[in-house]
Amino acid sequence: AGSTQLLALADTSDQHAPWLALLYIAVFSIGTLLAMMLFGLLLSKMRRSSVGSPRLSITLRVATGLLCLVTGTYMILGIAL
């Protein structure tokens, strides 16, 4: 999450009004924060729902791992190609 702000700054270099650049960075930062909070909330809800069921817990872990692998592979192939 730390290096993404540098990408936000790259977009603001051609802005003529400094307040627009600051607004862009603020909106970008708030959106990043909200997305991370939502992701954490969803993960905690999934974890709480699977506490009583070991099978559901394993299924959720495997599904999350596979989703991460697929997303990472897609991103790597998208960058490489």
Image (cartoon, helix red, strand yellow):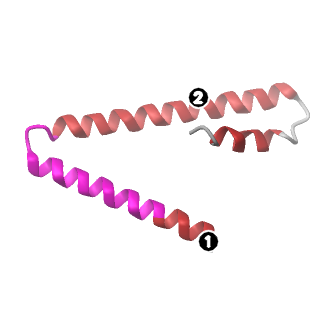
Determine which of the numbered discs, if any, sits on residue 80 in the image: 1
Instruction: Report if the CB atoms under discs 1 and 2 are less than 8 Å apart.
Output: no
Residue drawn at (73%, 33%), measured in percent from left and top? 24
Determine which of the numbered discs, if any, sits on residue 60 in the image: none
Q: Does 80 appear above or below 34?
A: below
- How would you rate the neighbour count of disc 1 (Cα within 10 Å): few for under 14, some for 14-19, many for 20 or more? few
The amino acid marked with disc number 1 is Ala
Q: Say whether residue 57 is magenta.
A: yes
Q: Left or right: where does residue 68 sit relative to residue 74?
A: left
Q: Left or right: where does residue 65 sit relative to residue 70?
A: left
Circle 2 sits in a helix, a strand or a loop, which is it? helix
Q: Left or right: where does residue 39 sit relative to residue 18?
A: left
- List the single residue furthest toward the right: 16
Q: Nearer the viewer, residue 59 or 19?
A: 59
Determine which of the numbered discs, if any, sits on residue 30 in the image: 2
The quadrant in which residue 8 appears is: top right
Residue range corresponding to the magenta coloring: 50-72
Residue drawn at (33%, 37%), measured in percent from left and top? 42
- List the single residue furthest toward the bottom: 81
- List the single residue furthest toward the front: 2
